[in-house]
Amino acid sequence: MLRVGLTGGIGSGKSTVASHLASLGARVIDADRVAREVVEPGAPALAAIAAEFGAQVLTADGALDRAGLAAIVFPDPERLRALEAITGPAIAARVATLRSAPTDALVEVYDMPLLVEKSLWVHEHLTVVVGAGEETRVERLVTHRGLAEADARARIAAQATDSQRHAAADVWIDNQGSRDVTVAAVEVLWHTRLMPYAVNLRDGIRAKRPDHTHLAPADPEWAAAGARVVARLAAALPGQGVDVHHIGSTSVPGLLAKPVIDVQIGVRRLADADAPDFMAAMRSAGYVLEPDRGQDHPHPSDAPAASWQKRFYGGCDPGRFVHVHVREIGSPAYEFALAFRDWLRAEPSAREEYAVLKQQLAASHPVTRTYSRAKEPWFDTAYGQVLAWIERTGWRAHGHA
């Protein structure tokens, strides 16, 4: 099942997006609804809240006075953290129960206001953020929810900033305008990305670009996209002795590239990547193993091929092409992938030479496979230059992100 994290600041209108995704067939888990359920009268969390904040946060009939509690916690980060320490575990347990329940839906949406603040987005296949300007959000909160303007602004200030949400967002839905425009954007997202991604996950199909050489101008979003892939893979493989890095041309600022995010996972032994737990975690994270792509081109070309073996996974997301190379930490293949990236980052002349080569070969090799093979003689030469750069600079792989 495709796991989608849905979030947005208070007043952004993400409930509009959630309800329409539900109408299209997604199972929606609403964290706000769960948060209300776990503090109903008689619930252990409500008793803990009363003990922490006093009886004044309860109504005459013993229910939670939400407005009164909000007035206490939103202006005070410490009191807000105290509340979250009580409600967080109860909400998490209830959400886990709901998400583990059987369903026929191919897409599950976790509607969670604090998805970014709590870094929970790393456990979802995609993060969808609903955005609107602060003034629009304040107006909505005052007009539709009856909040005082100061209260509305305090609640907004207590949440993540737009820049923090942008960093986590695979998809940003602008809800500044009319509901019809927002619903139309959700429809497009559902049919062009969410459902195709969900079907690929179900059937074990990786998303592939057309086999045509296309070089795109450098895009600042590549770095953010790479960081999201790295964070998700690191979260999917906890305790397995791995490190994860964005590599390849999209990891080099200013370099034109095929729009593919290449990521390297380092393992202590390559055999660790064949363990059932590792393979299952990769599959659950949305990556499909391709056994016939387990060999890198050795450098130099007469080097032992065994030192350049890997495991290769392709991502299932049709909206973001991802290649994952699993290599043994310390192997020549592992070291070169990181050193080559950092050499290009540090040496403008090398970066320009590589860009010119790419453009020349793309013009004469329109098929991606032949384009990639045509680059190998240049890589053999670059390998020696990288080794010399390592010797000159004292570069080491450990600690390079």
Image (cartoon, rainbow, N blue to C red):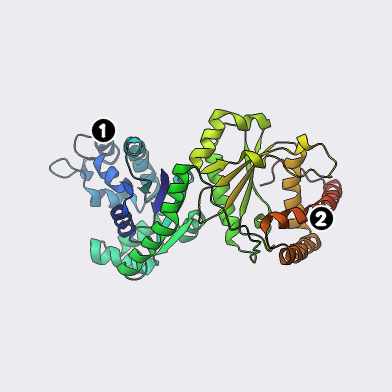
310 lies left or right of 220: right
The residue that disc 1 covers is 44
| Residue 265 visible, this angle | no
Q: As drawn, is 213 to the left or to the right of 133?
A: right
Position of residue 345 measured from the top left corner of the image (x, y, whole percent): 73, 57
Quarter where residue 220 is shown: bottom right
Secondary structure state at the residue bearing disc 2 = helix
Sequence-wise first label, 2 or 1:
1
- Please name the residue shown 24% across and 61% down the image: 145
The residue lying toward the viewer, choosing from 143 and 340, is: 340
Q: Amino acid at mark 2?
A: Trp
Question: How far across and down, in percent of the image, does residue 151 sit?
Answer: 31, 59
Can residue 378 be spotted in the picture? yes
Disc 1, SS: helix
Q: Which residue is tagged 2?
A: 378
Q: Which amino acid type corresponds to the residue marked 1 in the rendered image?
A: Pro
Name the mark nearer the viewer: 2 or 1.
Answer: 2
Mark 2 nearby-residue class (10 Å; few <14, some 14–19, many ≥20): few
